[in-house]
Image (tube, rainbow, N blue to C red):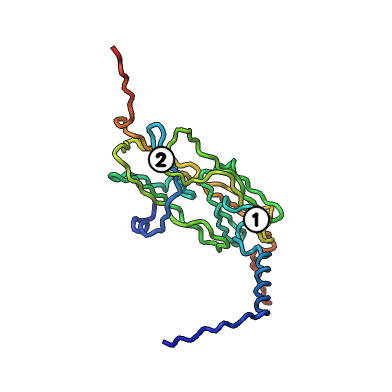
Amino acid sequence: MNLIRWRTQGIDPAREMERLQSEINRLFDLDYTDRSTGIFDRASSPAIDVIEESDGFSVLCDLPGVEQKDVDVSIGNNVLTIKGEKKMSTNSEKAKYFRKDEWFGSFQRTLALPTTVDPEKISADLNDGVLRVHLGKRDEVKPRQITVSVS
Amino acid sequence: MATTTKELETRRTIRPVCNIWEESGTVTLRLEMPGVPKENIDLRVESDHLIVRGNRPQPEENGNYVVRERQWGDFAQSYTLDETIDRERIEAKMEHGVLTVTLHVKEAVKPRKIEVRAR
């Protein structure tokens, strides 16, 4: 195998400027953080699934141990907010823990919705620790069957 | 359930998030199993093992996932029970996607206070 000396290309001022520009652009580009989480929710935002169906969207969120009264789902300016609090399970001071993985506290998750969502058609239910929010699409964007009559 | 044992063996499993604590003669396990209905819980004791399994129904397929962050799979976990646990007294309840299992420590191994009488 031949070993040849690797030649440095020297400093190209134009290239360096380009690199600096892209670095600065990246600073302003908030997209490079996690796309799916809002600016105010970091660690305490629960994982979600969003499924697009023909008549709307379903948002699924795992909230084990959270009661219905402790969850608040709201929509405003086309932004869906799921927030609430997971209450500590009642334990006395005497309890001796072997394992403590469960997390308690308040959580929040915001989701910018596409404009096709109708804010009037929203329903939410909490079943077996899973929150399901159904968002209906506007009637005008639903797929329609247009029959073409041939005369 | 319609699923066969073979199918269950090959399905992806994840370990539930849990809290385990001991308090006044009982050991309590809290296992988070969101999305598992009460009837899909399989809890059993086989010799020295406490086996917990929770089957999640398959996700619906009539749509496209735009965001998919939730972990998928059935929940499975097993624990070794030592001889101080009473096998006959195990209680379990499922509430808001959290399974709570209460194990009792055998009466014979509970600490007892023996009165010392002076004559």
Where is A86 relative to A12, above or below? above
Give residue B117's quadrant in the image.
top left
What amino acid is found at the position of numbered circle 2 in the picture?
Val
- Looking at the image, residue A137 sits to the left or right of residue B71; the answer is right
| Disc 1: host chain | A
Residue at image position (63%, 48%) is A73
Which element type, helix, strand or loop, lies under badge 1? loop
> Quadrant of the image for the C terminus of chain B?
top left
Q: Indicate the position of residue B97 as horizontal and vertical percent values.
A: 48, 45
- Looking at the image, residue A146 sits to the left or right of residue A62; the answer is right
Marks 1/2 same chain: no
What numbered label is drawn on residue B101?
2
Q: Indicate the position of residue B23 as horizontal and vertical percent values.
A: 41, 34
Give residue B103's quadrant in the image.
top left
What amino acid is found at the position of numbered circle 1 in the picture?
Ile
Crowd band around label 2 with a 10 angstrom C-alpha radius: few (<14), some (14–19), many (20+): some
Residue most extreme to the top: B119
Residue at image position (44%, 46%) is B18
| Disc 2: host chain | B
Which element type, helix, strand or loop, lies under badge 2? strand
Q: Indicate the position of residue A17 as horizontal and vertical percent values.
A: 68, 75
